[in-house]
Image (cartoon, rainbow, N blue to C red):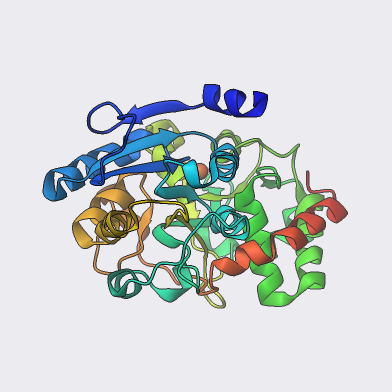
Amino acid sequence: MKKISLLLSLFILVSCSKEMNQELTPDELTIYTSRQPQLLEPILEKFSEETGIKVNLLSGNAQELMERIVIEDDKSRADIFMTVDAGVLWQAAERNIFSETKSEVLEANIPSYLRDPSGKWFGLSKRARTIVYSDDQFSEGDFSTYEDLANPKWKGKLCLRTSKKVYNRSLIASMIDAYGFDKAKKVVAGWVSNLTTEVFSNDTNALKAVSSGQCGVTIVNTYYLARLLDDPKYDNLKLFWANQDDRGVHVNISGAGIVKSSKNKEDAQILLEYLSSERAQDFYASANKEYPVLDSASVDDSIKGWGDFLEDGINVSKLGVLQKEAVFIAQETGYK
Ligand code: FE
């Protein structure tokens, strides 16, 4: 009981329409999400206008929201669980939170590698994690792959975010899939021995360390770079698309699935289909300067200059499957 009230106190309740009613009407949906409400509210308001389906948002930490859905069981108000990183969505599926959704619209709009093979969750935006360097120190021709950053020539030049962040665990998982455990471990060990300084708690601080000259290169999600580049102070930061001659750039997702106990799965599916449609994709991806999952949708003007890139086509559910091995590699190599 104490746990439930603690969890309750941690959440901010945001309503996109009227106040959340005690008894939900059938044409009302509730999303439990770790995404920032302001990224979702405009598109959800449009959805409500067009369909008459009201949408409530319950925002919080992904792990806590997942826990809450488990505790609430079939009394949960959650119709949809939405979060970032395939590793987290995979974990939610393992905890039996999702129902399986069969939708021709979702299957047509979302490439198969960006959704769960059994239809439990679907990618709604793509997040590319790649190399960023300072052009005060280096130029494009100096870089090739994530693995090359393990080469001793980068000693004292590399800055990384902590491996405790799921983004890096998923990146390591993608290397395990591509090269096997031993080679992936070697690469991570090489990164660790090339580190300039302690690992950073977030991507933005790693980028700032590159810009200031503390180090020369890092690996980050591109939307963090896009945000910093709004300030001309960080103009020396340059993006490099990694692994373009082999498996492609590591791509992760933000995504969502329909909760098993939802009393309104039909409307929940209509909402997921809407979020995968062109008008929603144009908005949804650009709100956080991510990439749309729908091919025909456009990217935000501010990131168009980075151009097209080859993506790693690994099914993102594998990033979840290999998560434990990735954590093990980080521990074994001293990547904190
Ligand atoms: Fe992020």
Count how many numbered circles sit on residues in the image.
0
- Quarter holding the N terminus is top right
- Position of 261 with respect to 156 (left or right) is left
Is residue 19 among the parts visible in the rendering? Answer: yes
Vertical placement of 70 versus 249: above or below?
A: above
Q: Where is residue 12? Give x, y as percent.
A: 44, 25
- The quadrant holding residue 296 is bottom left
Q: Where is residue 152? Give x, y as percent.
A: 79, 59
- Quarter holding the C terminus is top right
Q: Where is residue 161? Give x, y as percent.
A: 65, 43
> Which of the pair 117/250 is nearer the observer?
117
- Position of 130 with respect to 37 (left or right) is right
Residue at (24% x, 54% y) in the render: 280
- Position of 234 with respect to 280 (left or right) is right
Q: Residue furthest right?
A: 332
- Position of 2 with respect to 125 (left or right) is right
- The quadrant holding residue 25 is top left
Vertical placement of 320 versus 168: above or below?
A: below
Is residue 145 among the parts visible in the rendering? Answer: no
Vertical placement of 17 versus 130: above or below?
A: above
Residue at (36% x, 44% y) in the render: 288
> Which of the pair 180/266 is nearer the observer?
266
Residue at (47% x, 42% y) in the render: 76
> Which of the pair 284/303 is nearer the observer?
284
Q: Where is residue 64? Give x, y as percent.
A: 58, 37
